[in-house]
Amino acid sequence: MIKQYAQAFFILFTTVVFSQQKPDYELIEKNIKDENSEYYYTSLLERYRKGDKSMTLKQCEHLYYGFAFQDNFKNFRYKSLTDSIAKYEKNEDKLDSKNILKQLEFRNQILEKSPFDVNHIWGKINNLDLLKRQNEINICFNQLDIMHNVVRNSGDGLTKETAYYINNVQFEWFLINLLDLKATKNPETIDEIYEYILLEKNDKNINGLYFNVEKVQYTIEYQN
């Protein structure tokens, strides 16, 4: 079942045509602090956690890019939690429901602080699939949908001027995989605010993709 949903997701979101509009960080920061605004951040984040697909693109942009202005915004890994997940994934009883529930518990703790972590959202989808919790899987796919729409609407990634704007470097790899592309090497930093990923030859004739990472924090901290 999960393969069918994933295939439908990939097909749909690689064929959608997007406009290109860079995020206005100054305006976003102002709007998300206004409790009377439709862009008030606490409300948007609550809707995102529920997988609310009724949010407008503007609301989704305020949600995704507004996370840069939240006190708990960090682009870092939680080592003790990821180590625990890895431990349970290697366990002989890794398909046991208790084992899967522990993995899910750790992933949820990570996503509580880092709700746009696509790696752990995808890991959560796999956990939920084994537990046959389809409603929660749908929420996760809706969250990926929201992020994908926002990032793809920010540019086409073909030049620095039309770079994709991201709030987490993990999304670089998620998008490359989604587009069925392969990188030839690790990202190259350009002018301090861009990353360029050179790609293998492909039928889309894309040599590489540019990402604007000006709002990504590179400090990696390990939290026990």
Image (cartoon, grey):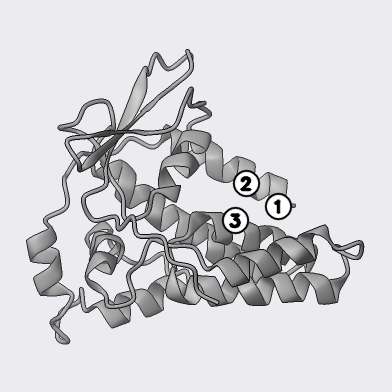
Task: Kindly report the distance in space between the C-alpha atoms of the residues bearing marks 3 and 1.
Answer: 11 Å
Given this view, does label 3 or label 1 mark the residue nearer the observer?
A: 3
Q: Residue at x 55, y 63 (%)?
A: 140
What residue does disc 2 label?
6
Task: Kindly report the distance in space between the C-alpha atoms of the residues bearing marks 2 and 3.
Answer: 10 Å
Task: Kindly report the distance in space between the C-alpha atoms of the residues bearing marks 1 and 2.
Answer: 6 Å
Query: In the image shown, does 16 or 216 lie closer to the viewer?
Result: 216
Q: Residue at x 43, y 62 (%)?
A: 76
Q: Is residue 170 above or below residue 73?
A: above
The amino acid marked with disc number 1 is: Ile
Mark 3: few/some/many CA within 10 Å (<14, 14-19, 20+): some
Which image quadrant is residue 164 in?
top left
The amino acid marked with disc number 2 is: Ala
Expressed as whole percent of the image width and height from the top left, the position of residue 64 reads: 31, 61
Q: Earlier in the sequence, mark 2 or mark 3?
A: 2
Q: Which mark is residue 173?
A: none
Q: Locate residue 117 relative to residue 188 in the image: left or right.
A: right
The amino acid marked with disc number 3 is: Trp
Q: Are marks 1 and 2 in contact (CB under 8 Å)?
A: yes
Given this view, does label 2 or label 3 mark the residue nearer the observer?
A: 3
Expressed as whole percent of the image width and height from the top left, the position of residue 204 reads: 42, 17
Count all numbered tags in the image, as a single digit: 3
Expressed as whole percent of the image width and height from the top left, the position of residue 158 reads: 27, 26
Q: Earlier in the sequence, mark 3 or mark 1?
A: 1
As helix, strand or loop, the secondary structure at mark 2 comes to: helix
Q: Residue at x 32, y 42 (%)?
A: 152
What residue does disc 1 label?
2
As helix, strand or loop, the secondary structure at mark 1 comes to: helix
Expressed as whole percent of the image width and height from the top left, the position of residue 33 reads: 15, 80
Q: Which mark is residue 122?
A: 3
Q: Locate residue 54 relative to residue 178 in the image: left or right.
A: left
